[in-house]
Amino acid sequence: MSETDYTPMWERLGLNLEAHAGLLEILGKAYGDIYLSQPGRPEGMGYFNFVMSEIHGLRIQELVAARDAGRPVIGTFCLYVPEEIILAVEGVCVGLCAGAEAGTALAEQYLPRNTCALIKSFFGFKLAGVCPYVEACNLVIGETTCDGKKKAYELFADLKETFVLELPQTKSPEARRLWRSELDRLVAKVEEAAGREVTAEGLAAAVRTVNAKRRALHRLSALRQTVPPPVSGLDALLINQVQFYDDPPRFTASVETLCDELDQRVAAGTGAVPASAPRLLVSGCPMAAPNWKLPYVIERNGAVIVAEESCVGERGTRNLVPEDGANRGEILDRIAERYLATDCACFTPNTERIEHLLQMARTYGVDGVVHYAIQFCTPYTAEAYRVREALRAEGLPLLEIETDYSMEDLGQLDTRVQAFLELLQQRRPSADTVA
């Protein structure tokens, strides 16, 4: 982690300094073991190493400076919160701490033990005093993507000012009207937090900024379709995770620089893994940083993840906002449609997700799919049935994983992944049968 001493800033934010130091030590070691141990990483990943080393340091310093300058710093847990509205008032939109076990016992004083790990994680980070992001925020924006989150935000509001967007569970005309009205309510809240108006000009500029970020990630995704892919799935996941914390233009420029290098690696036939490595698609729940357990197990066993059908992946970046809105109302209409098109498992029916999953499996030329669900996440564990049936019809092998953020099942995951990869190897034509 960072060599700079940020203790005075962390103290000002009210962090539990002893617990926070312990967390950083654990995360630093995990990052070194999982990421820095990878051979032959692209040089462009150096920027993302730096971001991770300063994730609780320099970036928090930037957020505190923005807040002190009168810019609203707004934290979110979900990609249904339109970043464009926050950027339109020169605000800063950041993801909040989740993705690791922290303050679990404290969180369970508020929440049932059988609550999903992500919800307990963001609650626990706050209660344990180890998330500088939530402490640097003026406001937290939640959303009703599941019953667990909905009830958790109700309790979280006792700890931090929280505004909750009501996300409809269908995409009917009535649901679309409700969602569009919710964005008007969000605009009013953001204007209140910023002390300035959301204008058409501000929205248009923000749409261009966020679209540029998504286009850079589209370019990265396209490069991963090559054989062999020029970047590991672990590194691609890290980039997708960093997008929720970093300054958008700076992040976009860094991804484009990396992609320039990856273009050269593709031209030279240089891959992150051998061309024979099994190609996998991971589908399901989001993997918030530092949730790297399953990808680490997969790739240390010789496979490579080439795509993520996930909120921290293609589901979250697939669609752009049309840039042709003529006034504030039209731009907000386009933002509303773009975000409602996202195929989260909270929607019913949700045939778009299955269609996108199959389309991605073909586009990326995968040998198999890993369906990842956080334990007690009912929407994704319930949708596993549809995924299973669709992949069976497609003739694609599926490995279903349901886990949490602990390391207790690491050995079991290792065994299951190894068995799945052996199955994929058996399905490949042998050398003597290839014409």
Image (cartoon, grey):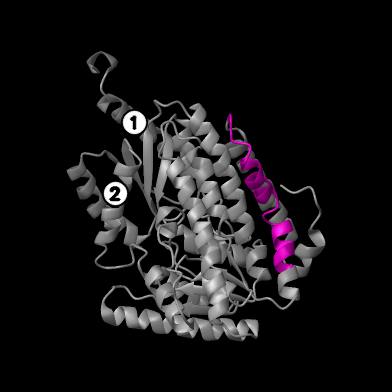
Residue 351 among magenta residues: no
Magenta segment: 39-64
Q: Is residue 34 visible?
A: yes
The residue shown at (55%, 70%) is 206
- Residue 156 visible to the viewer: no
Relative side of 2 to 167, left or right:
right
Residue visible at 35% across and 41% down in the picture: 364
Quadrant containing the C terminus is: top left
Q: Is residue 412 above or below residue 385?
A: above
Q: Quadrant of residue 37?
A: top right
**Is most of the magenta stretch helix, strand or loop?**
helix
Q: Residue 112, how many percent across, how many down?
A: 44, 66
Could you say where residue 177 lies in the image, as x and y percent from the top left?
Answer: 34, 83
Mark 2 highlights which residue? 359
The residue pinned by badge 1 equals 419
Amino acid of disc 2: Gln
Numbered disc 2: secondary structure: helix
| Residue at far left of view | 393
Amino acid carrying label 1: it is Ala
> How far apart, in angstroms, are the residues tagged by discs 2 and 1?
26 Å
